[in-house]
Amino acid sequence: MIKFSIRPCAAVIVRHLLEFKNAFEVFMVTYWCFFDLFSFGLLATSFKQPNALQHITTNIALWYFVARGSIGFAVSFVRDLHNVNFVSMMTTPLTLSEWFVSLIAMGIVNGLLGFLVTALWAALLFDVNVFSIGWVIIPAAISLLCSGCVLGTLVLSIVLTFGRRAESFVWIAGYFLAPFSGVFCPVASLPVILQKIAAWLPTSYVFACFGAGRSGQVLTTSQLLLKSFALNGFYCALALALFHWRFTRCRSTGLTRLEVEL
């Protein structure tokens, strides 16, 4: 039976939320949201296709559920390593499941913050309402947040395997999948080999459903979303198994090395 209590989990979440008292921490989150939206938004205004600006800015805003979600998920762990808090925390009654749920919560907070900031900039800079895509934004956001947490779990497993020298993956993992997911261009326009990779990514089905939704193909939209959730469930099981295996191995060899190895 898995022991779980909300109080220690909430304590870890609050400790990480207090990092947002630092103005530079907030700036780091909001600046890249602004930079990406402004750069790609200006590019989209030069396109001749109808609704290109709406399409690009909406995709960028939603992609932050994955990018900022995975970063927020994993950076909480990396921050503990830098502050030499991780080993001390693991010696407390805090269980692995409680700690893991707190990371998921931080991933959701960061993903939601990135999306809302980008949606606000889209409205202020380009007069684009990203919520105009309708009801599909709710299941799409949930699926993308799941993808962000799965990606964050994989990054955690990499850091557990290679130590702090692999922490650069925290910052690039969320953006690595963007070209294969149809964020900036349709998957159909990619080379065939890349389309085959995209077919195994739950994020590609989420962004594909927006095009189906615009053309009124509700059944197709639902099918695409179901595929994204199914793939997320499959990868979630694999990611959790890999994380548990790597954490168990690290605990047997000594967690202290994660804080000292570079």
Image (cartoon, grey):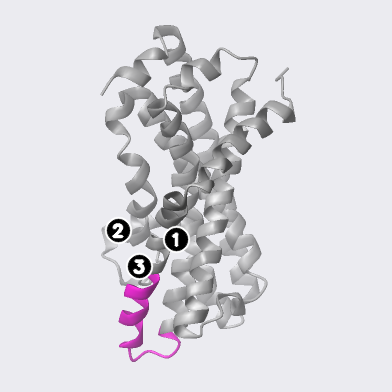
Mark 2: amino acid: Leu
Q: Which of marks 2 and 3 is nearer the N terminus?
A: 3
Q: Is disc 1 in contact with disc 3, using a CB cutoff of under 8 Å?
A: no
Mark 1: amino acid: Thr
Element at label 1: helix
For disc 2, the marked residue is: 194
Element at label 3: helix
Left or right: 185 as drawn, with respect to 246? left
Q: Position of residue 50 (x, y in %)?
A: 42, 91
Q: Earlier in the sequence, mark 1 or mark 3?
A: 1
For disc 1, the marked residue is: 30
- How far apart are the two marked residues, 1 and 2, measured between alpha carbons? 31 Å
Q: Earlier in the sequence, mark 1 or mark 2?
A: 1
Residue at (58, 35) in percent of width and height: 15
Residue at (64, 61) in percent of width and height: 139
Report the front residue among 51 and 209: 51
Element at label 2: helix
Residue 91 sits in quarter? top right
